[in-house]
Image (cartoon, rainbow, N blue to C red):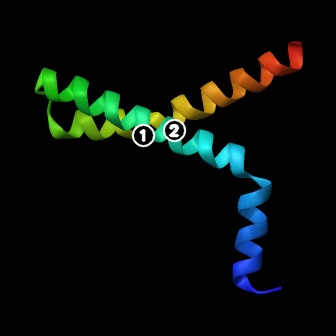
Amino acid sequence: MTLAETVRDHVAEHHDGMLFDLVFAIIWVTVVTIVFGALDAPQLVYYGALASGVVAYYGFAMSMDLAREMN
């Protein structure tokens, strides 16, 4: 199996998850940039808010999984 076939199979298998990850990342960065641009916060705080998106992503994804299991 070539690298191109491996990548194609991986994308086909995980398409929905990859799309969710991309949309979440775009929304998170956009919201943080707008909020911290309006507040004129220090650069370090802005980077911290961007990094907290990792925690927010896993919290949101886990809560979605739990909600699906409850149904």
Q: Position of residue 20 (x, y in %)?
A: 61, 39
Q: Nearer the viewer, residue 33 or 42?
A: 33
**SS type, badge 1:** helix
Q: Which residue was labeled with disc 1?
A: 26
Label 1 packing within 10 angstroms: few (<14), some (14-19), many (20+): few
Label 2 packing within 10 angstroms: few (<14), some (14-19), many (20+): few
Instruction: Please report the residue visible at 46 percent of the width from the left and 35 percent of the height from the top.
Output: 53
Picture quarter containing residue 4?
bottom right
Amino acid type, label 1: Ile
Instruction: Please report the residue visible at 76 percent of the width from the left and 78 percent of the height from the top.
Output: 5
Task: Report the quarter where the N terminus lies.
Answer: bottom right
Q: Which mark is residue 18?
A: none
Q: Nearer the viewer, residue 7 or 37?
A: 7
Residue lying at the far left of the rendered structure: 40
Q: Which residue was labeled with disc 2?
A: 23
Amino acid type, label 2: Val
Using residue 42 as the reference point, say whether residue 19 is left or right of it.
right
Spatial separation of the CA atoms under disc 1 and disc 2: 5 Å
Using residue 29 as the reference point, say whether residue 35 is left or right of it.
left
Using residue 19 as the reference point, say whether residue 26 is left or right of it.
left
Q: Position of residue 71 (x, y in %)?
A: 89, 12
